[in-house]
Image (cartoon, rainbow, N blue to C red):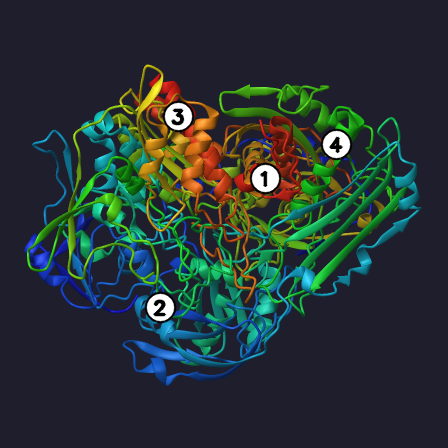
């Protein structure tokens, strides 16, 4: 039985708080944790499949043009080689998040260096890898492809444009103003598990073990790509070795393995090499962002301008939504916001953890720091003075808003010095030491989701949905939600995820998984409670099921009477999305040291204070936060994609030269979770967590670099060369 | 990886024999060679596994120095009591490189032969004169952040990426080499690596069929020994600039200043004129600048790596300041 | 007698194709998929295993090079029924998220405590000859060969410190 719930109104009943099991929010270890720490959790490429052939992708060595010939004979005689797949249905780019249709196909048409054009299949991985290097390909190159965002006239993204009041006038009249331009380099998700798929074809149905975040959309994308009905496709992603946006849509491994399996009639595994993951999955676009901030003598914003330039391939709808939180974070009656997209021939740009705010917020918060220094007020105070009552553009109320609490509590816990102070105030040996702060903001998203909850006759529960757990803690929090609602210890709740045979969840992306699929589980459990209440003769809102027994002494198993009871919860975001602006908020504080000789920066300590609605598990929520802060460190100091100026290829396409932070880059981190229930965010009052931790954190570090060394840097990442070029001479 | 014939050498003679021939190579730790073989940057037809030929020993020499076998792992060398006590710059340099996992496999000989990390060298679909003579240098007008500012040529601007050899250069160690004819020769580490010139494919002076058997350190010189590595991450990253320094002072003036530099050139960079400028003088910012002027006299940036020139100067300052404080 | 490698105490014949890395031998031939392939180039540490007591990247070594060697993988450290102290500590401290780098982290951490016990210095050590303690700074440097993209480092360090304290390292 399916129960539908569409949220059109805020829900202030906070039902989960009425339950007596006491497991919601508890810092429980992950239910799948033992499998992970013992290496027994199977990831996509690791399923034992008999007679599995191995495929390796061949990628383009031109930037734009046509493949005129693939000389299959050049490899078919090599040992073990079975086939060269150059099917027109191969995809050449990954699908964008929630695309729900196949991405660009027709692999003979090349639009970026490194684009997949064919798959070589052999008996063993070693044979396929060697043969892929030997495949002879001829091209007709279409010279002159634009490669740099400033090489073309960019397209305005009109939906993002805001002209409100007269910013130029506000700037001219302002007691204090800043007009600064920041840049950020491209980022890679660089999930630790490379994209991988094992496809099996039985002549009618296609089953694919893959590493994907959003099976509900991925099944449609795959069915569309290979030309099958969705009912003939099954996707399985029980364990996903990190996603961070790179596995939102189907990727080239999934479709090439599928087509090869269908053509050859035997299972085929395709695992992208690390270089291929970097070169032909998603990049976060580089950005150029101009800020104009006008303030009165008290530091209240009268004008707010944010114009950004990003890039993507022709034909892609995605434009890094840099302005996302700028629309509502700070006051300012006179507003100019504009996003422009340059069409260039670098690899596909798409979602990388926290698309938009991940780079928009560090730039905005850097500009705010410049303004605070100019006015001469505490940067915490500047932010507190500019928290708007309502969304300053749309006039909508906020669903809930904890920025002020995060700023105040964070500052106190960190021991923030409100100043006034000048840069280069503290030196320890070779190192300048300073502190910086920034606000955090990330829009809250929810999506439609379904989950089935079955109370088993033996008094345990089973939760089934095709939702994924990409390291976020989904397995655990769904067990906690069901456990809380049904009066079960979470170890009595079995959660099965990542299989399209289950009801369709929201998938993991945009930090929406917990609030969306968690709400579907909540809806199903509410329906189960109603039936149990009816059987027990107790009103549902009074029913206490804790520890498997009602307040009148009936046991759960009695009420079930030897039979399973199942309900499918179907949650849908409703009109409420149009009535409120919903966002997570927070604040970052960082202490850094900058070497006066070499410009090297080290983060000494960092604190994040966040308000993101109900916390479903304090352990996994905190882990999401420290993960986000770690990404902030990477964005601030080390991560930068470098593209060749002549053919646009990604130059630093490995983990030796694309510098994700290492353990030594990350100090002990402190996380404060500010208690909050957001009645409009979701039926469980929870908001997204996974991305907020990196939405602004890089600015806390950048601002601290200025406070420490006097180097005001407008370009992320702040590598030693950039610090040296900017740091005043001793 | 191309198919290859794998042979396990049991003795040095074996090893030398197996590695005869155009497309034969010796494999020890494998941490660099297998990396490059997977990319087909290296495509040996024959691989001689020399791990069991007994060249792992670290032993005192008659002259009070230390002989480090070619197959001693980086870890074995870095933690060796005598290296820690008498050649701390070598321990420090090794520990600043790579990771414990890699150092546990990487060997003395292999590390000396480590190839460049130039992006264009490592991508067989890009031009590179080192990998494919005559194809051009991709880095020259490309992305050259890692690249050389000293001793480069129009053919190649790659850098030697290692740390250990920079310390060996400062220590004036020697490399023992055995040839196909059983002939042995010894050359200073400072002369082991080549500048690219018009033969950029040549990383070092090893002739085909020659194998490194050991590195010999001279008798301990004492002094203050430092290895300073500047990199983009705090660990597990190649040097932007590194400095190995052995410094002694007496009565307020430098009596020894043996310095070698990494990250700047196709080889660990050692310029004896720097020691000449420093020795006999008291430490001062002006003196350090004079040393940097000598070091960087011929320095030439390629846009993206221009920063290495001021960075080298400043790192040299930092090292000399620290070393003179420690030594005083 | 065929040449063999001992994996978690069991002897296995060396594979025929010399191109097979120790990592692919474990994952593919032996189906010991606990050891992960993250980069295949020694740049991430997900493939870390312990060979004759030393942690190494199994992706950068050929199976054929390990005749007679003793290899310990994550499966050899502990099982769901009998996890090792380090495995338990990672679980309790949430020293992982997606779990993909985790076996490599745990193998690495296990061997690392032995290195500290041996008194081996690291880049973070103040002196080369002093006693080494499992401080946060030491652990962070010594674990920098194991990337974790989820960003669990702070919890990984906490897990290792806990085990080190218990073992009196």
Distance from Cα at disc 4 to Cα at disc 2: 58 Å
Residue drawn 48% across the image and 68% down it: A207
Specify few, some or many for label 3: CA neighbours under 10 Å numbering under 14, 14-19, or 20 or more.
some
Q: Which residue is mark 2?
A: B132
**Which image quarter: residue C164?**
top left
A138 sits to left or right of B47: right
Specify few, some or many for label 4: CA neighbours under 10 Å numbering under 14, 14-19, or 20 or more.
many
Contact between labelled residues 1 and 4, with CB atoms less than 8 Å apart: no
Instruction: Establish if A79 lies above or below A287.
Output: below
Distance from Cα at disc 4 to Cα at disc 1: 35 Å
Distance from Cα at disc 3 to Cα at disc 4: 35 Å
Q: Which residue is mark 4?
A: A403
Query: Secondary structure under badge 4?
Result: helix
Pair 3/2: label in front = 2
Q: Which residue is mark 3?
A: C162
Image location of residue A705, percent across then percent down: 61, 31
Pair 4/2: label in front = 2
Q: Which residue is mark 1?
A: A725
Front position in the image: A139 or A443: A139
Q: Are marks 1 and 3 on the same chain?
A: no
C70 sits to left or right of B102: left
């Amino acid at each position: 039985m399916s129960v539908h719930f569409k949220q059109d109104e805020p829900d202030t009943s906070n039902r989960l708080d009425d339950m007596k099991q006491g497991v919601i929010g508890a810092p429980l270890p992950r239910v799948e944790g033992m499998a992970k720490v013992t290496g027994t959790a199977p990831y996509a490429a690791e399923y034992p499949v008999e007679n599995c052939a191995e495929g390796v992708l061949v990628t383009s060595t031109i930037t734009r043009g046509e493949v005129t010939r693939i000389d299959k004979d050049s490899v078919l005689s090599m040992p073990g080689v079975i086939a060269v797949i150059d099917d027109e249905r191969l995809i050449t780019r990954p699908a964008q998040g929630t695309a729900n249709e196949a991405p660009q196909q027709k692999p003979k048409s090349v639009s970026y260096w490194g684009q997949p054009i064919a798959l070589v299949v052999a008996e063993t991985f070693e044979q396929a890898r060697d043969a892929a290097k030997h495949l002879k390909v001829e091209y007709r190159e279409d010279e002159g492809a634009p490669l740099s965002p400033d090489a073309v006239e960019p397209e305005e993204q009109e939906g993002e444009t805001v002209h409100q009041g007269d910013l130029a006038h506000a700037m001219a009249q302002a007691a204090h103003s800043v007009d600064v331009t920041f840049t950020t380099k491209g980022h890679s998700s660089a999930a630790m598990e490379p994209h991988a798929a094992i496809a099996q074809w039985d002549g009618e149905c296609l089953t694919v073990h893959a590493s994907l975040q959003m099976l509900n959309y991925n099944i449609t994308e795959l069915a569309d790509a290979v030309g099958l009905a969705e009912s003939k496709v099954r996707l399985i992603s029980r364990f996903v070795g990190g996603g961070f946006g790179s596995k939102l849509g189907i990727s080239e491994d999934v479709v090439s393995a599928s087509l090869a399996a269908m053509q050859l009639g035997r299972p085929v595994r395709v695992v992208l090499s690390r270089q291929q993951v970097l070169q032909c999955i998603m990049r976060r676009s580089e950005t150029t962002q101009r800020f104009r901030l006008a303030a009165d003598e008290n530091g209240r914003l009268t004008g707010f301008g944010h114009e950004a330039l990003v890039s993507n391939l022709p034909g892609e709808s995605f434009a890094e939504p840099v302005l996302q939180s700028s629309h509502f974070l700070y006051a300012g009656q006179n507003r100019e916001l504009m996003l422009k997209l340059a069409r260039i021939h670098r690899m596909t740009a798409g979602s990388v953890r926290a698309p938009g705010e991940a780079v928009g917020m560090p730039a905005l918060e850097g500009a705010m720091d410049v303004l605070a220094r100019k006015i001469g007020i505490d940067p915490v105070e500047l932010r507190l003075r500019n928290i708007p009552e309502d969304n300053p553009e749309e006039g909508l109320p906020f669903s809930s808003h904890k920025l002020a609490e995060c700023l105040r509590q964070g500052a106190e816990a960190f021991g923030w010095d409100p100043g006034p102070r000048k840069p280069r105030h503290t030196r320890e040996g070779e190192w300048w030491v300073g502190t910086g702060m920034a606000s955090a903001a990330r829009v809250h998203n929810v999506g439609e989701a379904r989950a089935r909850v079955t109370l088993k006759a033996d008094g345990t529960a089973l939760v089934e949905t095709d939702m994924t757990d990409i390291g976020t803690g989904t397995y655990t929090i769904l067990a906690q939600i069901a456990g809380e609602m049904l009066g079960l210890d979470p170890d009595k709740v079995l959660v099965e995820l990542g299989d399209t045979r289950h009801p369709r969840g929201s998938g993991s992306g945009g930090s929406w998984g917990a609030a969306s699929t968690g709400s579907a589980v909540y809806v199903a459990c509410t329906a189960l409670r109603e039936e149990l209440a009816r059987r027990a003769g107790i009103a549902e809102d009074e029913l206490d099921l804790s520890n498997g027994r009602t307040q009148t002494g009936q046991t759960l198993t009695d009420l079930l009477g030897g039979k399973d009871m199942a309900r499918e919860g179907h949650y849908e975001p409703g009109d409420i999305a149009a009535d409120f602006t919903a966002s997570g908020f927070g604040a970052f504080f960082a202490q850094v040291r900058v070497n006066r000789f070499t410009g090297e920066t080290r983060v000494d300590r960092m604190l994040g204070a966040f308000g993101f609605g109900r916390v479903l598990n304090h352990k996994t929520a905190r882990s999401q936060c420290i993960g986000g802060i770690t990404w902030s460190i990477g964005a601030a100091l080390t991560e930068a994609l470098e593209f060749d100026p002549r053919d646009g290829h990604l130059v630093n396409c490995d983990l030796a030269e694309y510098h994700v932070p290492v353990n030594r880059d990350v100090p002990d981190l402190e996380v404060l979770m500010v208690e909050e229930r957001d009645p409009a965010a979701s039926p469980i009052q929870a908001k997204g967590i996974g991305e907020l931790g990196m939405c602004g954190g890089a600015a806390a570090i950048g601002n601290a670099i200025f406070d420490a060394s006097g180097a005001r840097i407008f370009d992320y990442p702040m590598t030693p060369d950039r610090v040296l070029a900017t740091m005043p001479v001793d | 990886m191309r198919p290859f014939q794998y042979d396990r050498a049991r003795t040095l003679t074996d090893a030398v024999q197996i590695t005869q021939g155009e497309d034969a190579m010796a494999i020890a730790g494998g941490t660099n060679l297998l990396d490059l073989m997977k990319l087909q940057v290296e495509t040996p037809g024959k691989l001689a596994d020399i791990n069991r030929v007994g060249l792992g020993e670290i032993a005192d020499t008659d002259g009070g120095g230390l002989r480090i076998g070619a197959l001693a792992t980086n870890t074995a060398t870095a933690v060796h009591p005598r290296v820690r006590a008498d050649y701390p710059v070598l321990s420090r340099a090794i520990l600043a490189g790579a990771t414990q996992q890699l150092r546990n496999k990487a060997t003395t000989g292999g590390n000396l032969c480590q190839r460049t990390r130039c992006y264009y060298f490592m991508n067989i679909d890009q031009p590179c004169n080192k990998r494919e003579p005559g194809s051009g240098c991709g880095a020259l007008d490309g992305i050259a952040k890692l690249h050389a500012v000293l001793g480069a040529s129009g053919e190649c601007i790659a850098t030697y990426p290692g740390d250990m050899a920079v310390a060996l250069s400062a220590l004036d160690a020697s490399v023992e080499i055995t040839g196909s004819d059983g002939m042995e020769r010894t050359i200073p580490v400072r002369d082991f690596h080549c500048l690219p010139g018009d033969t950029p494919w040549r990383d070092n002076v090893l002739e085909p069929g020659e194998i490194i058997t050991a590195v010999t350190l001279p008798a301990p010189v004492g002094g203050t020994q430092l290895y300073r590595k500047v990199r983009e991450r705090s660990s597990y990253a190649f040097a932007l600039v590194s400095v190995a320094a052995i410094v002694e002072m007496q009565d307020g003036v430098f009596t020894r200043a043996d310095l070698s530099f990494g990250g700047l050139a196709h080889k660990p960079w050692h310029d004896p004129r720097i020691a000449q400028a420093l020795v006999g003088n008291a430490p001062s910012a002006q003196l350090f600048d004079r040393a940097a002027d000598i070091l960087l006299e011929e320095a030439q940036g390629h846009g993206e790596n221009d920063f290495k020139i001021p960075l080298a100067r400043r790192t040299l300052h930092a090292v000399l300041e620290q070393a003179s404080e420690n030594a005083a | 007698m065929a040449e063999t490698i001992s994996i978690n105490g069991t002897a296995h014949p060396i594979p025929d194709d010399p191109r097979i890395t120790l990592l692919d031998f474990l994952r593919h031939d032996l189906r010991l998929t606990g050891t992960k392939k993250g980069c295949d180039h020694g740049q991430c540490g997900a493939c870390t295993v312990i060979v004759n007591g030393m942690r190494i990247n199994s992706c950068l070594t050929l199976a054929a090079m390990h005749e007679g060697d003793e290899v310990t993988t994550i499966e050899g450290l502990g099982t769901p029924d009998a996890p090792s102290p380090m495995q338990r500590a990672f679980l309790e401290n949430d020293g992982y998220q997606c779990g993909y780098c985790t076996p490599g982290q745990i193998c690495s951490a296990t061997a690392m405590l032995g290195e500290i016990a041996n008194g081996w210095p690291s880049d973070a050590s103040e002196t080369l000859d002093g006693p080494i303690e499992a401080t946060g700074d030491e652990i962070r440097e010594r674990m920098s060969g194991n990337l974790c993209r989820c960003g669990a480092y702070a919890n990984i360090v906490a897990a290792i410190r806990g085990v080190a304290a218990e073992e009196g390292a």
